[in-house]
Image (cartoon, coloured by chain):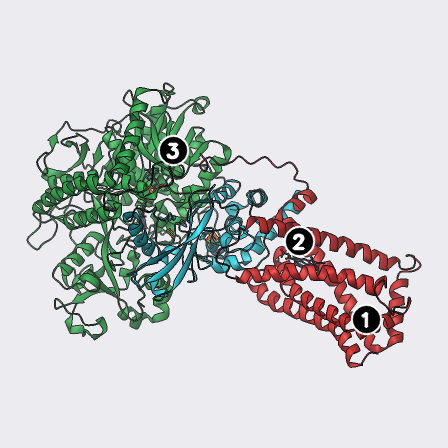
Chain colours: A cyan, B red, C green
């Protein structure tokens, strides 16, 4: 099939960007979205043009590196699917597809469709861990974990840190990402000693990084390829309130 | 090296709860939800009072009088009312200041998509924010109209029933009032549910109740308030 | 140009650090004998860690905790994205929580045997010992392993193991383990012990006075060439499966870090040892950019078959039972569909070579769940494999509940890597290599769920204990960019970049990479022969020459330039590919994952040759001719036997 693409091109952080139109012929329905871009890039390269920069690595939906806003939707139209797992059979001959980077002040554009998500790492560094220096651990069976807690922890630990939640949010809020980590660690007995500092520090860092506040629109959870539930935000708020009150 | 070495964050100066809460986006939301709930509480009482309009002029005016004398002699005349007014004023101011700050922050933090495609979440933020502005303007008008009677042409001090009927006898009075209440309804439909999340009581199971409950409460409040102008318009109240 | 397959035989290599004595005491003896670094001195010692996967992430975090100054590098935008994240199945540990007869010794035994007797006993034993601590460590970090209703950890048996010793976190074990290590790493970043350089690619090793003292890296955002010095360099840069272009590895996985070190003198051991995984989603067309692994657990309930007749193009449902060949059940009645990875892979290749393959290009076999659905019911099958079926459908657009899945083998893991001693130090003093990047503990074939174990063993427990023995002699001389060795290293990097950009030819990097991959898959994949390998070396040389003549790399070096990144990696893959073929050519035995056409039993099974090949082939970069150093392997505890699955 033949597709029209409108793609965001931007030379670098300090540059202004613009939408540029491309046409790609011979798109096979079995291609993934990124393979379709590969084809376009091969052509641009041979034509002496600058190929389109986009982030990707595992191409199997787990590393969280791919990050395209496709027709206004982070990771494209298919639910629970990262950009790299989106296949062209969902499009029809002659379709026009608009491709943009994640948009949020805290995620500046590095080039074209590539953004800088290091603010997420900063959030984790400020408390998204359990302090367990190597060698200090007791036997793994010393503390059983109730299955329900283990499941809640797992559900939230599935976050791949892609940033689609921020890109989907009209406020550019990182609450879903932050919530996922807080809920994962605070649900576990091992996470209890640092429970309060964790949530206070992570929220502080999140705010400092320039993410917007949360209006609970639910767009984040809809865009999230890993199904992190919106309720995790409620839990984050509870943890935050409890920790703040304990502080007082 | 723009991206590799992470910027060192300055250590937070104050951990004192009010200050810390006020600084954080979650804290501001908590303030909005608490003040919002205070306002809802007020609205429910207010609505219950309004409904008394249907019991006739006398009952309604005596209710208005009772409000002013409530708590006497411990409180002076209108003391309770003033307490409520102060509380509400604080709530409204805190609610609005938080709302404005968060909105400005959000607008700054979210460069617009170039597709120009409307998004579902944009709808929620749009109705909350524009609804808030409508409510703000309405509250001012409402006070000028029925409390200070500044803009009510046929107002008489001491006859709230008459004043109310006077307002709803004008077409613009009805339009303003009903439009504002629809805005309120939308505001509460999302607001009540959101407040539950902000205060951290939302869970997967509870939200199955909170969602419809929010719609229900929003509906009841809206209908309860709209009943009065409709009553006046249809002549049930005159 | 040298003759094809020619090499020079050098001196044998010996692992100087390996302790002797009873095997179960060697690791504690080594730890006791190793020199310690005075805690007050640790702040003055710096270590570069290239890679933030399970191996590099856990090592950097632990070294940071110990008080060293660590400088960490990865090419992704965040350390959390290293390819370890993609591991699905699980991680082995000899916990014996099931009381089913497991022990450190059994895990040791299984791993040596699984590796087809081409790994060091001492190393493997240490791995089995440490496996137990890994689980404790990860649980303490909050890794959400699967649990049972009683709250205790669940395990499963994996890859044909007789005991249930594989811990897992749904199908995301690698992700959860990596996030644990990543979080520990971030904690040390916040504590100021680790300086993180993400989006930086190591392009050269700096060796001064015979010691590894730093690296030259490129800032992938600005293009700036950047030097970093330290008292020791740790490479944890993962495997080189991408030399085949199509593999289950992430697109960015590369050999550059280890290959550059090899060119600076580090020995490259057993480069031809690669693992080919039988259950991957087949190639769908020329556009294909990578292959996706489907968990091996599918073979527990799926039946593998192809049509009996070559060229049968009917839809699978139209082929009657009598015209189907359930070839694994037929050839290996004892193990059936559960034969080890290498056997399943090769059998699939054989039936496809006979023209009986299915799907596009005839490169696929059916994995059929209809019996399982009849027997267990659709709901039960869905509960077990639902997410895998979904993934398959997402990629292929076919519904495996209705049509059988199509699978085909794909390159998955590389057992070869830089040669290291018991301390995980290469022959270059100060250069340590951990994780998939070293030639490691898996011999000629890795057992399922043991790479995660090895990566974390190396990073959390082994390296932090052994590196001190080296660092105790530091800190070493302070270096600056003016040092002649540093200048040389920087220049070699900038020259290469300039050369790549200057070609300005008419073929893209990917087109070369794809072609190289085809050659490797065809001749240095599952089955190798003398003739094929010689042909491959010739083809690789021609293609490499063409690459440097015709490649087109757009843009400049002073910008974010993904084509340039890829070009550099592919250039190194060319050199590695040739060495892999030379290694494969010289090893005229069938062993582990490698079937050598000339070395088979009468009924076509792999025939190992312990007389001639019970050694590690450690290759020295010789410029013209590679130099082979052999490290003899001795088996005191597990006596070599021939594997048989019939
Ligand atoms: C699909 C798949 C499934 C698997 N499933 C299992 C399983 O179930 N059980 C199991 O035990 N094993 C499994 N494995 C194998 C296992 O995942 C890997 O062997 C292991 O994770 C490798 O870890 P590592 O830390 O050595 O390297 P990696 O995780 O690959 O990390 C490499 C790191 O090095 C960095 N790097 C590389 N080159 C450079 C450079 N030039 N400059 C700077 N940085 C560089 C990268 O950025 C990255 O951080 C699987 C592998 C694959 C591909
Ligand atoms: C006076 C003008 C008002 C303005 C400008 C305003 C504005 C807003 C805005 C912008 C929000 C969205 C906040 C967010 O989710 O980020 C909000 C939420 C809310 N508002 Fe208002 N509002 C006003 C009046 C009211 C009134 C009269 C009530 C109650 C009767 C009310 C109740 C609520 C509630 C309960 C919330 C939800 C808080 C939360 O999300 O936790 N608001 N308001
Ligand atoms: S919460 Fe979901 S959308 Fe947000 S970073 Fe995690 S996986 Fe991505
Ligand atoms: S490329 Fe890894 S999640 Fe898409």
The kind of secondary structure element at disc 3 is loop
Residue A48 position, x and y percent, is 30, 46
B99 vs B164: above or below:
above
Q: Quadrant of ligand 2?
A: bottom right
Residue under the image location 77 percent in, 53 percent down: B90
Q: Is mark 2 within 8 Å of ligand 2?
A: yes
> Distance between the Cα atoms at labels 1 and 3?
72 Å
Residue named by callout 3: C224
Residue C471, position as x, y percentages in the image: 36, 24
Mark 1 and mark 2 in contact? Answer it, CB < 8 Å.
no
Discs 1 and 3 share one subunit: no
Q: Chain of mark 1?
A: B
Query: Label 1 vs label 2: CA separation?
Result: 30 Å
Q: Is label 1 or label 2 in front? A: 1
Mark sitting on residue B99: 2
- Which residue is rendered at x = 40% and y = 34% of the image? C72
| Residue C271 placement (x, y as % from top left) | 20, 40
Q: What label does residue B167 carry, if any?
A: 1
Label 2 secondary element: helix
CA gap between label 3 and label 2 equals 44 Å
Residue furthest right as drawn:
B73
Q: Is residue C549 above or below residue C479?
A: below
Give whichever of C34, B225 is nearer the camera. B225
Helix, strand or loop at disc 1? Answer: helix
- Earlier residue among tags 1 and 2: 2
The reply to whether residue A223 is visible in this rendering is: yes
């Amino acid at each position: 099939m033949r597709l029209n693409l409108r793609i965001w091109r931007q030379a670098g952080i300090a540059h202004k960007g613009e939408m540029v139109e491309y046409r790609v012929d011979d798109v096979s329905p079995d291609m993934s979205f990124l393979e379709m871009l590969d084809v376009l890039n091969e052509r641009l390269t041979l034509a002496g043009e600058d190929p389109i920069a986009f982030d990707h690595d595992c191409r199997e939906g787990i590393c969280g590196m791919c990050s395209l806003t496709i027709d206004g939707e982070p990771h494209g139209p298919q639910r629970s699917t990262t950009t790299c797992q989106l296949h062209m059979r969902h499009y029809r001959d002659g379709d026009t597809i608009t491709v943009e980077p994640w948009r949020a002040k805290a995620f500046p554009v590095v080039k074209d469709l590539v953004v800088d998500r290091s603010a997420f790492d900063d959030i984790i560094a400020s408390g998204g861990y359990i302090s367990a220096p190597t060698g200090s651990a007791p036997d793994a069976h010393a503390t059983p974990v109730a299955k329900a807690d283990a499941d809640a922890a797992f559900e939230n630990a599935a976050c791949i840190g892609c940033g689609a939640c921020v890109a989907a949010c009209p406020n550019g809020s990182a609450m879903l990402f932050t919530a996922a980590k807080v809920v994962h660690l605070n649900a576990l007995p091992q996470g209890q000693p640092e429970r309060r500092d964790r949530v206070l520090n992570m929220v502080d860092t999140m705010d400092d990084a320039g993410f917007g506040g949360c209006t609970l629109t639910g767009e984040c959870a809809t865009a999230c390829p890993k199904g992190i539930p919106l309720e995790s935000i409620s839990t984050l708020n509870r943890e935050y309130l409890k920790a703040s009150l304990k502080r007082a | 090296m723009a991206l590799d070495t992470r910027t060192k964050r300055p250590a937070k100066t104050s951990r004192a709860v009010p200050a810390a809460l006020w600084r954080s986006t979650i804290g501001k939301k908590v303030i909005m939800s608490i003040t919002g709930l205070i306002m809802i509480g007020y609205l429910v009482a207010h609505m219950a009072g309004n409904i008394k309009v249907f019991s006739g002029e006398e009952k309604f005016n005596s209710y208005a009088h009772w409000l002013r004398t409530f708590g006497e002699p411990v409180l002076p005349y209108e003391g309770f009312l003033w307490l409520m007014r102060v509380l509400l004023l604080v709530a409204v101011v805190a609610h609005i200041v938080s709302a404005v700050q968060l909105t400005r922050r959000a607008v700054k933090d979210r460069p617009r998509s170039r597709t120009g495609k409307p998004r579902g979440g944009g709808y929620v933020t749009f109705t909350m924010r524009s609804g808030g502005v409508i409510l703000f303007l309405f509250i001012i008008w409402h006070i000028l109209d029925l409390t200070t009677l500044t803009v009510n042409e046929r107002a008489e001090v001491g006859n709230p029933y008459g004043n109310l009927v006077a307002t709803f006898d004008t077409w613009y009075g009805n339009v303003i009032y009903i439009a504002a209440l629809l805005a309120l309804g939308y505001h509460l439909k999302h607001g009540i549910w959101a407040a539950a999340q902000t205060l951290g009581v939302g869970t997967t199971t509870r939200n199955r109740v909170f969602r419809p409950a929010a719609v229900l409460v929003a509906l009841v409040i809206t209908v309860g308030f709209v009943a009065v102008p409709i009553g006046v318009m249809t002549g049930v109240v005159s | 140009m040298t003759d094809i397959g020619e090499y020079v035989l050098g001196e044998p290599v010996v692992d100087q650090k390996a302790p002797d004595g009873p095997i179960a005491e060697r690791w504690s003896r080594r730890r006791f004998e190793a020199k310690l670094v005075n805690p007050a001195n640790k702040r003055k010692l710096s270590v570069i860690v290239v890679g933030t996967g399970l191996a590099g992430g856990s090592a950097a975090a632990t070294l940071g905790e110990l008080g060293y100054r660590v400088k960490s590098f990865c090419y992704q935008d965040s350390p959390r994205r290293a390819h370890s994240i993609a591991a699905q199945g699980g991680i082995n540990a000899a916990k014996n929580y099931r009381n089913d007869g497991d022990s450190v010794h059994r895990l040791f035994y299984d791993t040596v045997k699984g590796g087809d007797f081409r790994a060091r006993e001492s190393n493997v034993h240490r791995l089995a010992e440490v496996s137990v601590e890994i689980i404790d460590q990860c649980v303490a970090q909050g890794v959400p392993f699967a649990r049972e209703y009683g709250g205790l950890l669940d395990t499963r048996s994996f890859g044909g193991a007789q005991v249930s010793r594989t811990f897992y976190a749904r199908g995301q074990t690698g992700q959860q383990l990596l996030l644990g290590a990543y979080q520990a790493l971030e904690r040390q970043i916040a504590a100021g012990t680790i300086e993180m350089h993400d989006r930086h690619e190591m392009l050269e090793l700096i060796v001064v006075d015979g010691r590894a003292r730093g690296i030259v890296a490129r800032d992938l955002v600005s293009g700036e060439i950047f030097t970093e010095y330290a008292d020791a360099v740790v490479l944890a840069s993962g495997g080189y499966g991408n030399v085949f272009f199509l593999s289950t590895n992430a697109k960015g996985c590369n050999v550059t870090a280890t290959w550059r070190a090899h060119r600076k003198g580090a020995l490259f051991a057993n480069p031809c040892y690669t693992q080919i995984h039988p259950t991957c989603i087949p190639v769908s067309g020329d556009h294909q950019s990578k292959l996706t692994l489907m968990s091996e657990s599918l073979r527990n309930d799926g039946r593998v078959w192809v049509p009996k007749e070559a060229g049968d193009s009917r839809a699978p449902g139209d082929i009657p039972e009598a015209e189907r060949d359930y070839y694994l059940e037929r050839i290996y009645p004892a193990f059936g569909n559960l034969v080890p990875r290498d056997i399943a892979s090769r059998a699939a290749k054989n039936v496809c070579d006979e023209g009986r393959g299915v799907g596009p290009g005839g490169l696929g076999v059916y994995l059929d769940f209809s019996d399982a659905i009849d027997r267990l019911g659709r709901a039960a099958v869905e509960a077990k494999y639902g997410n895998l079926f979904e993934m398959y459908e997402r990629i292929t657009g076919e519904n495996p509940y209705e049509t059988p899945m199509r699978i085909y083998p794909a390159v998955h893991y590389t057992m070869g890597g830089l040669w290291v001693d018991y301390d995980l130090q290469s022959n270059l003093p100060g250069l340590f290599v951990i994780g998939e990047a070293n030639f490691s503990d898996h011999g000629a074939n890795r057992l399922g769920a043991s790479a995660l174990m090895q990566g974390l063993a190396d990073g959390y427990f082994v390296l932090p204990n052994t590196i001190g023995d080296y660092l105790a002699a530091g800190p070493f001389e302070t270096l600056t960019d003016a040092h002649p060795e540093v200048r040389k290293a920087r220049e070699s990097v900038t020259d290469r970049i300039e050369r790549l950009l200057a070609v300005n030819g008419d073929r893209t990097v990917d087109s070369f990479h794809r072609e190289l991959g085809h050659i490797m898959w065809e001749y240095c994949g599952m089955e190798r022969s003398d003739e094929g390998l010689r042909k491959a070396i010739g083809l690789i040389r021609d293609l490499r020459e063409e690459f440097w003549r015709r490649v087109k790399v757009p843009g400049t070096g002073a910008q974010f330039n993904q084509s340039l990144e890829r070009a550099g990696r592919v250039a190194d893959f060319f050199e590695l590919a040739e060495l892999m073929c030379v290694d494969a050519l010289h090893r005229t035995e069938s062993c582990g994952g490698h079937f050598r056409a000339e070395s088979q039993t009468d009924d076509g099974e792999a025939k190992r040759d312990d007389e001639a090949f019970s050694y590690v082939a450690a290759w020295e970069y010789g410029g013209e001719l590679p130099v082979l150093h052999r490290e003899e392997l001795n088996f005191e505890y597990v006596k070599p036997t021939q594997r048989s699955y019939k």
